[in-house]
Amino acid sequence: MNAPRPPSPPWRWRGALRLGVLVGFLGLPWLRWDGRQALLLDLDARRFDLFGWTLWPDDVGLLLGLLLAMALALLTHLAGRIWCGHACPQTVWSYAFSLIDSFLAQRLPRALARPATQAAWLLLSLWTGITFVGLFSPITGLVTASVQGGWSGWETFWVLFYAAATWGNAGFLREQVCRSLCPFARAQPLLVDPQTPRMLYDARRGEPRGPRPAGLGGVIGRGRGLLDPTSAQDYVFRAAHPWLAGPMPTFSADRLGDCTDCAACLHACPMQLDIRQGPQTDCLACGACLDACEQQQSRAGFGPGLIRYCSPQTMAGQPRRGWRPRTVVLASLLLVLLSAGAWHLL
């Protein structure tokens, strides 16, 4: 019987990745290339400067949008919700706002922490609005004009609009945007299949869950082994629906699985989902539950991998197939769009 495998890929870098995306976005308009702004969609001149490559309206537009959408769809199909959990602006800015909130709450008196947090949120939101508009209007002129009060009406509107949207979405709505407003989240079930990685709980190893004396050891180490899939799912169902299935039986400590029922995964989840109930469409695959579970498992002396990022097929011990029907369709569409774009540019 195989020992539980460590989670793959590691998720310890997720905070650094999100901050990197944030810093990259805020610094992107300031990059220079051959004396010009490296990335600038100049609406007045009707040209798109991309690191020394100039595109005109006939070169971009619908085709570029379709390329990006298809690339994101293929990425999601092959790697799961990597974009949603680690690079989506809603996720990144919500994470930044949470860091600001936690940092100030720990260092300021309660009476000052809240107004200071709101002020910091507003400053970050305003700079986000300026940065976004700076992708369409030269950023140096935009910042200079902000000091001199010389913004045009449209520049003022869009800066304030995106600042307000950032402040509201990242500061207050947060997971509700992903759950109820994001159209891409609604399209996820169409893109995934049993081979697509997602956050999964190893019920065969974790069930039946419950507290136990310290030093008991994991199911592999003490010889209990993994449950059969039917029994494991029965315990999962009973734990999730006690009013329907009745209370869980009482187990001796040596028959318990590796889940200590600490609910750390539930409390860590920004969507307030219980990963132990199985795959759920609202899961962002952010890895918060995985990190929380690993910390608790380490304290209990168990190995990692009770929650891991893998496909259902891999969790069941079956080999993963690289090319599937949806993979072929999405890759073919992306190739067609790339070919059409190259032909149009050449």
Image (cartoon, rainbow, N blue to C red):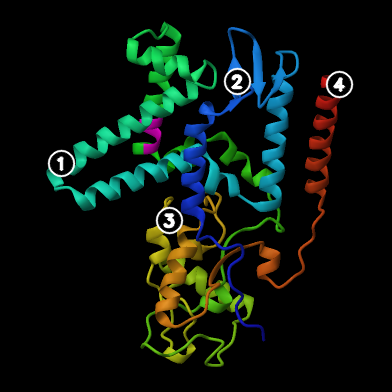
Work out whether 149 lies above or below 280: above
Tag 1 residue:
112
Please state which amino acid type lies under the numbered disc 1: Leu
Q: Residues within 10 Å of mark 1 (few under 14, many from 20)?
A: few
Q: Indicate the position of residue 68 as horizontal and vertical percent values.
A: 68, 33
| Position of residue 49 measured from the top left corner of the image (x, y, whole percent) | 65, 20
Question: Is label 3 in a helix, a strand or a loop?
Answer: loop
Looking at the rendered image, the disc whose residue lies closer to the viewer, 3 or 2, is 2
Q: Secondary structure at mark 4?
A: loop
Specify the amino acid type for callout 4.
Leu
- Quadrant of the rendered image containing residue 187: top right
Magenta-colored span: 166-170
Whether residue 127 is situated above or below residue 199 in the rendered picture:
above
Q: Amino acid type of disc 2?
A: Gly
Indicate the position of residue 78 as horizontal and vertical percent values. Answer: 71, 51
**What residue appears at the point 56 percent right and 93 percent down from the top-left corner?**
223
- Residue occupied by mark 2: 35
The earlier-in-sequence mark between 4 and 1 is 1
Q: Earlier in the sequence, mark 1 or mark 3?
A: 1
Q: CA distance from mark 2 to mark 4?
A: 26 Å
| Mark number displayed over residue 178 | none
